[in-house]
Image (cartoon, rainbow, N blue to C red):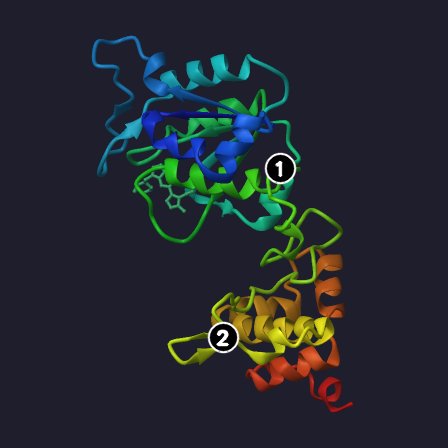
Amino acid sequence: MRIDIITIFPEYFAPLNVSLIGKAAQRGDITFGVHDLRDWTHDVHHTVDDSPFGGGPGMVMKPEPWGDALDAVSAGGTDPLLVIPTPAGVPFTQRHAARYAAEPWLIFACGRYEGIDGRVADEARSRMRVEEVSIGDYVLAGGEPAVLVMAEAVGRLLPGVLGNAESAANDSFGFDGGSSGGPMAGLVEGPAYTRPRVWRDREVPPVLLAGDHGAIARWRRDMALRRTAQNRPDLVARLLAGRPNQADEEAADLLGRLSDHDREVLSQAGFPVSGEDVAH
Ligand code: JD8
């Protein structure tokens, strides 16, 4: 996979040289190109911003450097997917990460200031696929941190990047690009434990030490259901209701995956799954 990043802070991406993603880049599983937007300015101050038409606070990024930068960077191949982080974008999810991981070439455009002149994305759409995404409902000062987040979420799904001990199949939110995700589909994970068996008078749950893998799997799913109910009631509601704009088959599948035992656990966690289901 090739990932190009256009930014006014190229040094922001030094972290891409370390850990999982760094090793993947060294192995050639991912090829990164980090480009300084100012290379496409022509004035002595390398100006990339100007005051907003219509007034208002802050500055807006000028279209010309962006147009020229995207021309140059996208000229290096065919059919890149341009991803523009913005707080106004669609929520970036594990489903996006899986889909992006199947792309041969991603270009990330990092805005700063109040954002990038709106014509840049529109003009880019005339010659390439463009997606505007947000990594969460909080305000960052620019797109760079969002690109670091997405590069890791995508990079770890590439073949060979995760060690064989790890696998994305058990990811929280579980969507590994398969039909509708792994066993943890729609749930967050429960807690994990390692040695020592006792720490500060706190014991590891005995079920994890007894070697009964069926009981361990059951216990882990119960903990995932309880933690999801506690921390992410929105996910449980989605699981139970399957919101209309969700791919029906995914909702139905997620719902279909709920055993009576699961429903009992959710009911005890305060989620009134339909009475008759729980009874029998
Ligand atoms: C790109 C400029 C800053 C945003 C005025 C603060 C993503 N989840 C997210 N939160 N914030 C961003 C994000 C923020 C950005 C840019 C992404 C480019 N800013 C602007 C609008 C309000 N300043 C993001 N993904």
Q: Residue at x 74, y 84 (%)?
A: 277
Query: Which picture quadrant has residue 35?
Result: top left
Q: CA distance from mark 1 to mark 2?
A: 31 Å
Q: Percent position (x, y) of residue 51?
A: 23, 28
Q: Which residue is mark 2?
A: 230
Name the one closer to the observer, 125 or 29. 29
Extreme-bottom residue of the structure:
279
Query: Which picture quadrant has residue 183?
Result: bottom right
Q: Residues within 10 Å of mark 1 (few under 14, many from 20)?
A: many
With respect to residue 140, does 26 lie above or below?
above
Report ligand 1 position as a quadrant.
top left
Q: Percent position (x, y) of residue 203?
A: 48, 79
Q: Percent position (x, y) of residue 255?
A: 72, 69
- Locate the C terminus by quadrant: bottom right
Name the one closer to the observer, 216 or 125. 216
Q: Which residue is mark 1?
A: 101
Say left or right for 178 vs 268: right
Q: Is residue 106 visible to the viewer in this orientation of the structure? A: no
Q: Residues within 10 Å of mark 2 (few under 14, many from 20)?
A: some
Query: Which picture quadrant has residue 242?
Result: bottom right
Amino acid at pointer 1: Ala
Question: What SS does tag 1 mark?
Answer: helix
Q: Is residue 66 visible to the viewer in this orientation of the structure? A: yes
Q: Residue at x 58, y 58 (%)?
A: 172
Name the one closer to the observer, 212 or 274. 212
Q: Residue at x 33, y 22 (%)?
A: 62
Q: CB at mark 2 closer than 8 A to ligand 1? A: no
Label disc, if present, on residue 267 of the rendered structure:
none
Q: Percent position (x, y) of residue 56?
A: 23, 38
- Locate the N terminus by quadrant: top right
